[in-house]
Image: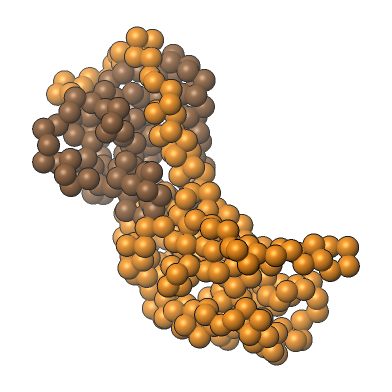
Amino acid sequence: MGVISAATFQRLYLLYLIGAFRNGVYGSKRLHKVAYIPARKPDAIRPFEFMKYLYGQYSDTLDDIKDQLNSMGYIVAVPLDTAEIVKFKKHEFNLGGNRFILQGSAMRGRHRKALAAISLDLPQLIDEAVEEYGYLKEQDLVNACYRFPEFQDASDGNLIFAGNVSDQVEIDLSDDECADLEIALNPVFIETMLRLDKALETQPIEWGKVQKAEGLSAPNA
Amino acid sequence: MSGERSRKPKAYRLLMHDTFLQAYFALQEEDTRLSASLITQINKSKADPTSGSPLDDVLNPALAGKLRKLHVGGRKGLRFVYLFHAGLSVVLPIFLSAERKPKFRWEQNLPSIEVAAQQILADYQAKDWSKFQEV
Protein backbone atom coordinates (compact mmCIF):
# COMPACT_ATOMS: atom_id res chain seq x y z
CA MET A 1 0.00 0.00 0.00
CA GLY A 2 1.42 3.36 -1.06
CA VAL A 3 0.58 6.93 -0.15
CA ILE A 4 0.01 10.07 -2.18
CA SER A 5 -0.56 13.62 -1.02
CA ALA A 6 -4.07 15.06 -0.89
CA ALA A 7 -3.13 17.62 -3.55
CA THR A 8 -1.99 14.87 -5.91
CA PHE A 9 -5.25 13.03 -5.33
CA GLN A 10 -7.21 16.21 -6.09
CA ARG A 11 -5.30 16.72 -9.34
CA LEU A 12 -5.78 13.11 -10.32
CA TYR A 13 -9.49 13.26 -9.53
CA LEU A 14 -10.04 16.41 -11.57
CA LEU A 15 -7.99 15.11 -14.50
CA TYR A 16 -10.12 12.00 -14.58
CA LEU A 17 -13.34 13.99 -14.30
CA ILE A 18 -12.41 16.34 -17.14
CA GLY A 19 -11.29 13.41 -19.26
CA ALA A 20 -14.63 11.68 -18.69
CA PHE A 21 -16.33 14.31 -20.85
CA ARG A 22 -16.32 13.19 -24.46
CA ASN A 23 -15.52 16.59 -25.95
CA GLY A 24 -14.22 18.49 -22.98
CA VAL A 25 -16.11 20.38 -20.29
CA TYR A 26 -18.16 23.29 -21.55
CA GLY A 27 -17.67 25.93 -18.91
CA SER A 28 -16.29 26.16 -15.43
CA LYS A 29 -19.78 26.21 -13.94
CA ARG A 30 -20.52 22.82 -15.47
CA LEU A 31 -17.27 21.45 -14.10
CA HIS A 32 -18.10 22.52 -10.56
CA LYS A 33 -21.63 21.20 -10.74
CA VAL A 34 -20.71 17.80 -12.12
CA ALA A 35 -17.83 17.44 -9.64
CA TYR A 36 -20.38 18.08 -6.92
CA ILE A 37 -22.56 15.12 -7.87
CA PRO A 38 -20.33 12.29 -6.57
CA ALA A 39 -19.82 14.29 -3.36
CA ARG A 40 -23.54 13.94 -2.56
CA LYS A 41 -23.30 10.25 -1.67
CA PRO A 42 -23.52 9.82 2.11
CA ASP A 43 -20.18 8.00 2.36
CA ALA A 44 -18.51 9.90 -0.47
CA ILE A 45 -14.81 10.62 -0.69
CA ARG A 46 -14.81 14.39 -1.07
CA PRO A 47 -11.57 15.81 -2.40
CA PHE A 48 -13.15 19.26 -2.65
CA GLU A 49 -15.28 21.43 -0.39
CA PHE A 50 -18.38 22.99 -1.93
CA MET A 51 -19.94 26.32 -1.10
CA LYS A 52 -23.34 27.75 -1.97
CA TYR A 53 -22.87 30.76 -4.19
CA LEU A 54 -25.10 32.78 -6.47
CA TYR A 55 -24.64 30.36 -9.35
CA GLY A 56 -24.88 27.27 -7.25
CA GLN A 57 -22.31 24.79 -5.99
CA TYR A 58 -18.76 26.04 -6.20
CA SER A 59 -15.39 24.91 -4.87
CA ASP A 60 -12.45 27.29 -4.51
CA THR A 61 -10.08 24.34 -4.17
CA LEU A 62 -11.36 22.74 -7.35
CA ASP A 63 -10.88 26.00 -9.18
CA ASP A 64 -7.29 26.27 -7.91
CA ILE A 65 -6.56 22.70 -8.98
CA LYS A 66 -8.09 23.39 -12.39
CA ASP A 67 -5.75 26.36 -12.78
CA GLN A 68 -2.79 24.20 -11.77
CA LEU A 69 -3.68 21.57 -14.36
CA ASN A 70 -3.96 24.33 -16.92
CA SER A 71 -0.59 25.82 -15.97
CA MET A 72 1.04 22.40 -16.35
CA GLY A 73 -0.51 22.09 -19.80
CA TYR A 74 -2.45 18.99 -18.70
CA ILE A 75 -5.70 20.59 -19.70
CA VAL A 76 -6.22 23.29 -22.25
CA ALA A 77 -8.82 26.01 -21.92
CA VAL A 78 -10.43 26.95 -25.22
CA PRO A 79 -12.57 30.12 -25.15
CA LEU A 80 -16.25 29.51 -25.81
CA ASP A 81 -18.18 31.63 -28.27
CA THR A 82 -21.05 31.66 -25.81
CA ALA A 83 -19.08 33.16 -22.92
CA GLU A 84 -20.94 36.09 -21.49
CA ILE A 85 -20.65 38.50 -18.60
CA VAL A 86 -23.72 38.99 -16.46
CA LYS A 87 -24.14 41.99 -14.19
CA PHE A 88 -25.84 41.49 -10.85
CA LYS A 89 -26.18 44.58 -8.69
CA LYS A 90 -22.62 45.96 -8.59
CA HIS A 91 -20.93 42.69 -9.49
CA GLU A 92 -20.02 41.10 -12.78
CA PHE A 93 -20.03 37.34 -13.26
CA ASN A 94 -18.41 35.46 -16.06
CA LEU A 95 -20.68 32.61 -17.06
CA GLY A 96 -17.95 30.10 -17.74
CA GLY A 97 -16.02 31.19 -20.75
CA ASN A 98 -13.89 28.16 -21.55
CA ARG A 99 -14.06 24.59 -22.69
CA PHE A 100 -11.58 22.46 -20.74
CA ILE A 101 -9.99 19.64 -22.65
CA LEU A 102 -7.71 16.94 -21.27
CA GLN A 103 -4.28 16.55 -22.85
CA GLY A 104 -2.80 13.07 -23.09
CA SER A 105 -6.11 11.26 -23.08
CA ALA A 106 -4.22 8.00 -23.57
CA MET A 107 -3.38 8.13 -19.88
CA ARG A 108 -6.99 7.94 -18.80
CA GLY A 109 -6.80 4.21 -18.20
CA ARG A 110 -3.85 4.73 -15.90
CA HIS A 111 -5.65 7.47 -14.00
CA ARG A 112 -8.71 5.29 -13.71
CA LYS A 113 -6.58 2.54 -12.24
CA ALA A 114 -5.04 4.98 -9.76
CA LEU A 115 -8.42 6.29 -8.61
CA ALA A 116 -9.75 2.76 -8.29
CA ALA A 117 -6.70 1.97 -6.16
CA ILE A 118 -7.98 4.57 -3.70
CA SER A 119 -11.60 3.51 -3.83
CA LEU A 120 -12.80 0.85 -6.24
CA ASP A 121 -16.04 2.57 -7.25
CA LEU A 122 -14.64 6.10 -7.52
CA PRO A 123 -14.07 6.14 -11.31
CA GLN A 124 -17.53 4.72 -11.88
CA LEU A 125 -19.15 7.37 -9.68
CA ILE A 126 -17.41 10.06 -11.70
CA ASP A 127 -18.36 8.44 -15.00
CA GLU A 128 -22.00 8.20 -13.91
CA ALA A 129 -22.07 11.83 -12.81
CA VAL A 130 -20.73 12.92 -16.18
CA GLU A 131 -23.17 10.72 -18.10
CA GLU A 132 -26.21 11.83 -16.10
CA TYR A 133 -25.44 15.52 -15.63
CA GLY A 134 -22.47 16.42 -17.78
CA TYR A 135 -24.35 16.91 -21.04
CA LEU A 136 -27.46 18.66 -19.77
CA LYS A 137 -28.22 22.12 -21.08
CA GLU A 138 -26.60 24.54 -18.70
CA GLN A 139 -29.83 25.91 -17.29
CA ASP A 140 -31.20 22.40 -16.79
CA LEU A 141 -28.01 21.46 -14.96
CA VAL A 142 -28.23 24.52 -12.74
CA ASN A 143 -31.90 23.87 -12.04
CA ALA A 144 -31.19 20.25 -11.14
CA CYS A 145 -28.42 21.25 -8.79
CA TYR A 146 -30.57 23.94 -7.20
CA ARG A 147 -33.20 21.36 -6.36
CA PHE A 148 -30.90 19.25 -4.18
CA PRO A 149 -32.23 19.49 -0.60
CA GLU A 150 -28.81 20.03 0.99
CA PHE A 151 -28.31 22.97 -1.37
CA GLN A 152 -31.70 24.39 -0.46
CA ASP A 153 -30.87 24.05 3.23
CA ALA A 154 -27.51 25.81 3.00
CA SER A 155 -27.32 29.58 3.41
CA ASP A 156 -25.83 31.72 0.68
CA GLY A 157 -22.06 31.85 0.92
CA ASN A 158 -21.95 28.93 3.34
CA LEU A 159 -20.42 25.52 3.14
CA ILE A 160 -22.51 22.69 1.72
CA PHE A 161 -19.91 19.95 2.02
CA ALA A 162 -16.45 20.06 3.53
CA GLY A 163 -13.66 18.10 1.92
CA ASN A 164 -12.90 14.90 3.83
CA VAL A 165 -9.53 13.78 2.51
CA SER A 166 -6.56 13.63 4.85
CA ASP A 167 -3.15 15.05 3.95
CA GLN A 168 -1.92 11.60 2.96
CA VAL A 169 -4.15 9.30 0.96
CA GLU A 170 -3.60 5.57 1.03
CA ILE A 171 -3.56 4.02 -2.40
CA ASP A 172 -3.09 0.46 -3.54
CA LEU A 173 -0.16 1.24 -5.84
CA SER A 174 3.56 0.59 -5.58
CA ASP A 175 5.92 3.19 -4.19
CA ASP A 176 7.23 3.70 -7.69
CA GLU A 177 3.79 4.41 -9.09
CA CYS A 178 3.07 6.80 -6.23
CA ALA A 179 6.36 8.61 -6.83
CA ASP A 180 5.51 8.96 -10.52
CA LEU A 181 2.17 10.52 -9.67
CA GLU A 182 3.67 12.89 -7.11
CA ILE A 183 6.30 14.14 -9.51
CA ALA A 184 4.19 14.27 -12.66
CA LEU A 185 1.27 16.01 -10.95
CA ASN A 186 3.38 18.56 -9.10
CA PRO A 187 2.65 21.91 -10.78
CA VAL A 188 5.74 23.67 -9.44
CA PHE A 189 8.04 20.93 -10.66
CA ILE A 190 6.36 20.51 -14.05
CA GLU A 191 6.18 24.24 -14.71
CA THR A 192 9.84 24.55 -13.77
CA MET A 193 10.77 21.71 -16.10
CA LEU A 194 8.79 23.30 -18.92
CA ARG A 195 10.66 26.55 -18.39
CA LEU A 196 14.00 24.77 -18.19
CA ASP A 197 13.27 22.86 -21.39
CA LYS A 198 12.39 26.15 -23.06
CA ALA A 199 15.51 27.82 -21.65
CA LEU A 200 17.67 25.05 -23.12
CA GLU A 201 16.27 25.87 -26.54
CA THR A 202 16.45 29.63 -26.33
CA GLN A 203 19.60 30.13 -24.29
CA PRO A 204 22.47 27.87 -25.34
CA ILE A 205 24.78 26.40 -22.74
CA GLU A 206 28.13 28.16 -22.76
CA TRP A 207 30.15 24.98 -22.45
CA GLY A 208 33.39 26.94 -22.51
CA LYS A 209 32.44 28.48 -19.19
CA VAL A 210 31.38 25.21 -17.56
CA GLN A 211 34.02 23.41 -15.52
CA LYS A 212 34.66 19.71 -15.86
CA ALA A 213 33.51 17.82 -12.79
CA GLU A 214 36.21 16.74 -10.37
CA GLY A 215 35.80 13.98 -7.84
CA LEU A 216 33.01 12.47 -9.83
CA SER A 217 34.40 9.63 -11.83
CA ALA A 218 32.52 8.70 -14.94
CA PRO A 219 34.88 6.24 -16.57
CA ASN A 220 32.44 4.80 -19.06
CA ALA A 221 30.87 8.03 -20.21
CA MET B 1 10.51 7.81 -28.42
CA SER B 2 10.73 4.17 -29.46
CA GLY B 3 12.28 5.25 -32.72
CA GLU B 4 15.17 6.81 -30.87
CA ARG B 5 16.19 3.46 -29.41
CA SER B 6 16.83 2.00 -32.81
CA ARG B 7 19.05 4.87 -33.92
CA LYS B 8 22.75 4.95 -33.27
CA PRO B 9 23.19 6.66 -29.89
CA LYS B 10 24.19 10.29 -30.10
CA ALA B 11 26.97 11.75 -28.05
CA TYR B 12 25.25 13.53 -25.18
CA ARG B 13 26.81 16.04 -22.82
CA LEU B 14 25.75 16.01 -19.21
CA LEU B 15 25.34 19.26 -17.31
CA MET B 16 25.19 18.77 -13.56
CA HIS B 17 24.09 21.47 -11.14
CA ASP B 18 25.64 21.99 -7.72
CA THR B 19 22.53 20.72 -5.94
CA PHE B 20 22.87 17.35 -7.62
CA LEU B 21 26.62 17.30 -7.16
CA GLN B 22 26.17 17.91 -3.44
CA ALA B 23 23.65 15.10 -3.29
CA TYR B 24 26.21 12.83 -4.93
CA PHE B 25 28.98 13.81 -2.49
CA ALA B 26 26.64 13.29 0.48
CA LEU B 27 25.80 9.86 -0.84
CA GLN B 28 29.47 9.07 -1.37
CA GLU B 29 30.11 9.74 2.31
CA GLU B 30 27.20 7.61 3.44
CA ASP B 31 27.20 4.66 1.10
CA THR B 32 29.96 3.97 -1.40
CA ARG B 33 28.02 1.15 -3.09
CA LEU B 34 25.06 3.41 -3.74
CA SER B 35 27.26 6.23 -4.95
CA ALA B 36 28.97 3.80 -7.34
CA SER B 37 25.56 2.76 -8.57
CA LEU B 38 24.66 6.41 -9.07
CA ILE B 39 27.77 6.92 -11.20
CA THR B 40 26.73 3.93 -13.29
CA GLN B 41 23.27 5.36 -13.79
CA ILE B 42 24.60 8.82 -14.57
CA ASN B 43 26.77 7.24 -17.23
CA LYS B 44 23.79 5.33 -18.49
CA SER B 45 21.67 8.47 -18.75
CA LYS B 46 24.45 10.17 -20.65
CA ALA B 47 25.17 7.27 -22.99
CA ASP B 48 21.51 6.75 -23.83
CA PRO B 49 19.02 9.05 -22.12
CA THR B 50 16.12 6.97 -23.41
CA SER B 51 17.33 4.06 -21.27
CA GLY B 52 15.56 5.60 -18.28
CA SER B 53 11.83 5.04 -17.86
CA PRO B 54 9.70 8.02 -18.79
CA LEU B 55 7.54 9.57 -16.09
CA ASP B 56 4.32 8.22 -17.53
CA ASP B 57 1.94 10.65 -15.94
CA VAL B 58 3.50 13.72 -17.51
CA LEU B 59 0.77 14.85 -19.89
CA ASN B 60 2.25 17.99 -21.38
CA PRO B 61 3.34 17.15 -24.94
CA ALA B 62 6.32 19.49 -24.64
CA LEU B 63 7.78 17.30 -21.90
CA ALA B 64 6.61 13.92 -23.10
CA GLY B 65 9.46 11.44 -22.86
CA LYS B 66 11.96 14.05 -21.75
CA LEU B 67 11.62 13.50 -18.02
CA ARG B 68 13.06 10.13 -17.09
CA LYS B 69 13.94 8.13 -14.02
CA LEU B 70 16.50 5.50 -13.17
CA HIS B 71 16.88 3.35 -10.08
CA VAL B 72 20.05 3.69 -8.09
CA GLY B 73 20.98 0.58 -6.10
CA GLY B 74 18.15 -1.49 -7.55
CA ARG B 75 14.40 -1.14 -7.36
CA LYS B 76 14.47 -0.65 -3.60
CA GLY B 77 17.16 1.97 -3.85
CA LEU B 78 17.13 5.65 -4.73
CA ARG B 79 15.48 7.34 -7.63
CA PHE B 80 17.36 9.56 -10.04
CA VAL B 81 15.26 11.93 -12.16
CA TYR B 82 16.69 13.72 -15.17
CA LEU B 83 15.65 15.89 -18.07
CA PHE B 84 17.10 15.45 -21.49
CA HIS B 85 16.84 17.26 -24.76
CA ALA B 86 17.47 15.07 -27.77
CA GLY B 87 17.77 17.94 -30.22
CA LEU B 88 20.47 19.63 -28.17
CA SER B 89 22.07 16.38 -26.97
CA VAL B 90 22.02 17.47 -23.35
CA VAL B 91 21.20 15.60 -20.16
CA LEU B 92 20.48 17.44 -16.91
CA PRO B 93 20.26 15.49 -13.67
CA ILE B 94 17.47 17.08 -11.65
CA PHE B 95 16.85 15.17 -8.48
CA LEU B 96 18.09 12.28 -6.39
CA SER B 97 15.93 10.95 -3.58
CA ALA B 98 17.82 11.13 -0.30
CA GLU B 99 16.83 7.74 1.10
CA ARG B 100 15.99 4.28 -0.08
CA LYS B 101 12.44 3.32 -0.88
CA PRO B 102 10.03 3.09 0.88
CA LYS B 103 11.70 5.17 3.57
CA PHE B 104 11.79 8.14 1.23
CA ARG B 105 8.23 9.46 1.10
CA TRP B 106 7.69 11.50 -2.02
CA GLU B 107 4.51 13.04 -0.74
CA GLN B 108 6.50 14.46 2.20
CA ASN B 109 9.49 15.61 0.18
CA LEU B 110 7.88 17.65 -2.55
CA PRO B 111 9.50 20.91 -1.42
CA SER B 112 12.98 19.42 -1.89
CA ILE B 113 12.16 18.41 -5.46
CA GLU B 114 10.65 21.79 -6.22
CA VAL B 115 13.57 23.68 -4.67
CA ALA B 116 16.15 21.63 -6.58
CA ALA B 117 14.35 22.17 -9.87
CA GLN B 118 13.85 25.88 -9.28
CA GLN B 119 17.48 26.39 -8.28
CA ILE B 120 18.68 24.71 -11.46
CA LEU B 121 16.37 26.85 -13.57
CA ALA B 122 17.32 30.08 -11.78
CA ASP B 123 21.06 29.50 -12.20
CA TYR B 124 20.60 28.42 -15.81
CA GLN B 125 18.57 31.51 -16.67
CA ALA B 126 21.11 33.70 -14.85
CA LYS B 127 23.87 32.04 -16.90
CA ASP B 128 25.67 31.34 -13.66
CA TRP B 129 27.82 28.62 -15.16
CA SER B 130 29.91 28.43 -12.00
CA LYS B 131 26.97 26.49 -10.52
CA PHE B 132 27.23 23.78 -13.16
CA GLN B 133 29.79 21.17 -14.07
CA GLU B 134 30.15 18.96 -17.08
CA VAL B 135 30.35 15.25 -16.40
Residue under the point 11% across and 41% down: B6
In the displayed orientation, state which residue is furthest to the front: A81
Tell me if residue A124 comes above or below residue B99 in the rendering.
Answer: below
Q: Position of residue A87 (x, y in %)?
A: 82, 66
Residue under the point 76% across and 81% down: A154
State whether residue B122 appears in this view. yes
Q: Nearer the viewer, residue A139 or B75?
A: A139
Q: Nearer the viewer, residue A196 or A139?
A: A139
Tell me if residue B5 comes above or below residue B132 in the rendering.
Answer: below
Q: Position of residue B45 (x, y in %)?
A: 23, 34
State whether residue B18 appears in this view. no
Chain B is which colour? brown
- Locate residue A89 relative to residue B99 in the image: left or right: right
Q: Nearer the viewer, residue A20 or B24?
A: A20
Q: What chain is the orange one?
A: A
Image quarter for residue A105? bottom left
* Count of all numbered marks drawn on residues in the image: 0
Q: How is the image coloured?
A: by chain
Q: Where is the C terminus of chain A found, in terms of image quarters?
A: top left
Q: Where is the N terminus of chain A found, in terms of image quarters?
A: bottom left
- Locate residue B105 relative to residue A61 in the image: left or right: left
Image quarter for residue A62? bottom right
Tell me if residue B83 comes above or below residue A145 in the rendering.
Answer: above
